[in-house]
Image (cartoon, rainbow, N blue to C red):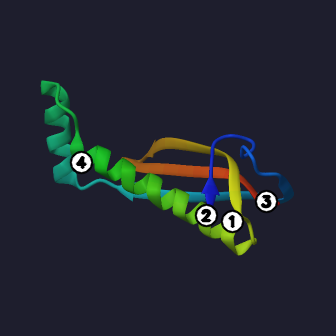
Amino acid sequence: MIVTTTPSIEGRAIVGYLGIVTGEAILGANIFRDIFAGIRDIVGGRSAAYEEELAKARRTALAEMEAEATRLGADAVVGVDLDYEVVNNMLMVTSSGTAVRLG
C-alpha cells in the first residue's frame, strides 16, 4: 500500500477514487512518565517517553487508515494528513486521506 501526503503518485495514474479513509489513536501516557517528562522539560532534555507514545499513536492511526483502504480495495492512499491533539491528558492522533485505485 502506497501512502503519501501528495495528491498524486508520480508515474502512476489514479483510475478510481474510493473515498475518504481515516484512522484514530488515543493513548494515555503513564503517570510516572509524565512526572519524569516534566522534570526533563524543566532541565531542557528531550522527553523520550512522549516521543515514544507519539510514534506509537502515529503508527496506529496510519495502520487503521491503511486497513480501511485495503477493505475498500485501494492500492494507495493520497493526500494524507496527520493531526495531533491532547485530550484530557491523553494523546490523540488522527490520519485521513483518499483511498484510490491505481492503473
Residue 14 lies left or right of residue 58; in this view the side is: right
Q: Marks 4 and 1: in contact by CB < 8 Å?
A: no
Q: Quadrant of the N terminus?
A: bottom right
**Residue 29, x across and y down, in percent:** 29, 53
Q: Secondary structure at mark 3?
A: strand
Q: Quadrant of the C terminus?
A: bottom right
Nearest to N terminus: mark 4 or mark 2? 4
Per the model, the C-alpha gap separating discs 2 and 1 is 5 Å
Nearest to N terminus: mark 2 or mark 3? 2
Per the model, the C-alpha gap separating discs 1 and 4 is 31 Å
Per the model, the C-alpha gap separating discs 2 and 3 is 15 Å
Q: In the image, what residue type sits under mark 3?
A: Leu
Q: Marks 3 and 2: in contact by CB < 8 Å?
A: no
Q: In the image, what residue type sits under mark 2?
A: Glu
Q: In the image, what residue type sits under mark 4?
A: Ala
To which residue does mark 3 refer? 102
Residue at 75% from the left image edge and 47% from the top image edge: 11
Residue 80 lies left or right of residue 32; in this view the side is: right
**Residue 31, x across and y down, in percent:** 21, 53
Task: Please tell me whether mark 3 or mark 1 is closer to you in this view.
Answer: 3
Q: Is residue 81 above or below residue 101?
A: above
Q: In the image, what residue type sits under mark 1?
A: Ala
To which residue does mark 4 refer? 49
Residue at 82% from the left image edge and 52% from the top image edge: 13
Any mark on residue 66, and which? 2
Q: Marks 1 and 2: in contact by CB < 8 Å?
A: yes
Q: Residues within 10 Å of mark 3 (few under 14, many from 20)?
A: some
Q: Residues within 10 Å of mark 2 (few under 14, many from 20)?
A: many
To which residue does mark 1 refer? 69
Q: Depth check: 43 or 66 in front?
A: 66
Per the model, the C-alpha gap separating discs 4 and 3 is 39 Å
Which residue appears farthest toward the bottom when viewing the image?
71
